[in-house]
Image (cartoon, rainbow, N blue to C red):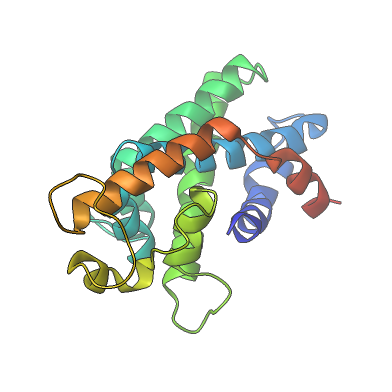
Amino acid sequence: MLEQLLKTLVDQGQQQVVENPAIPNELNQQVIGEAGRSIVDGLQGALAGGGLSQLMGMLTGGGQQGQGSGLAGLLSNPMVQNIIQSFTGKLTSQFNLNPATATQVGSQLIPEVLGRFSRQVSDPNDSSIDINSVIQSLTGGQLGQTNFNDLAGRFAGRGAGGDVDGDGDVDLQDIIASVSGAAGAQRNAGGGIMDMIGQFMR
């Protein structure tokens, strides 16, 4: 999952970052890497906070979410707004970019990347990635027994699983609890996003 996301990020970052005269060339790789970190951290944070259904809705909707579709819908998504705010804050504090430039880059790059990525995830003709592999990646593979492509069966309590909330059955709350704990642990563990970005930008 991470590799597909970062490839998408590098492709989209060509125009928004590399070709942007407001961003010094020596910062291109760092800025794109920080965008990747902000996205992964934001998605993991959403899962850790119990936002499994919201994340699945965004990704399986091909970039369409509730209050509109495409980039407009993503921009109105609180999860995406939080990622944009985190990223733009880092652009100004860590890279000393002008706030207006940081806002423009964040508001365009993050939704474009997530929109393209979600279309890839929801494309039945693309077998390289699906919602199951995304969530397993965000949780560090700790939920190997859970198939998020077949949540209906899981909600009914069929198959292997655990009664995390102690109510006697395996339901949505159990799955959310499991995902939240695993995502929180993986978020604290971190990852080598910057190294992967460097490989893609060579």
Residue 194 location, x and y as percent? 73, 39
User: In percent of the image, x 63 and y 21: which residue is there?
Assistant: 97
Report the residue that reaches farthest toward the right.
Answer: 202
- Examine the image and state in which quarter residue 190 appears: top right
Q: Answer whether residue 41 is visible to the viewer in this image.
A: no
Outermost residue toward the bottom in this view: 125
78 vs 55, nearest the viewer? 55
Furthest residue toward left: 167
**Measured from the top left, where is residue 155 in percent x and y?**
20, 65
**Residue 64 located left or right of residue 124:** left
Is residue 59 at least partly visible in the picture? Answer: yes
Which image quarter: residue 152? bottom left
In the picture provided, is 6 more to the left or to the right than 75? right
Q: Position of residue 127 (x, y in %)?
A: 54, 79
Q: Position of residue 67 (x, y in %)?
A: 21, 52
Give left or right: position of 40 versus 190.
Answer: left
Closer to us: 117 or 70: 117
Q: Residue at x 44, y 65 (%)?
A: 132
Say which quadrant the N terminus sits in: bottom right
Q: How many numbered discs, if any?
A: 0
Which residue appears at 70% of the width and 50% of the height? 14
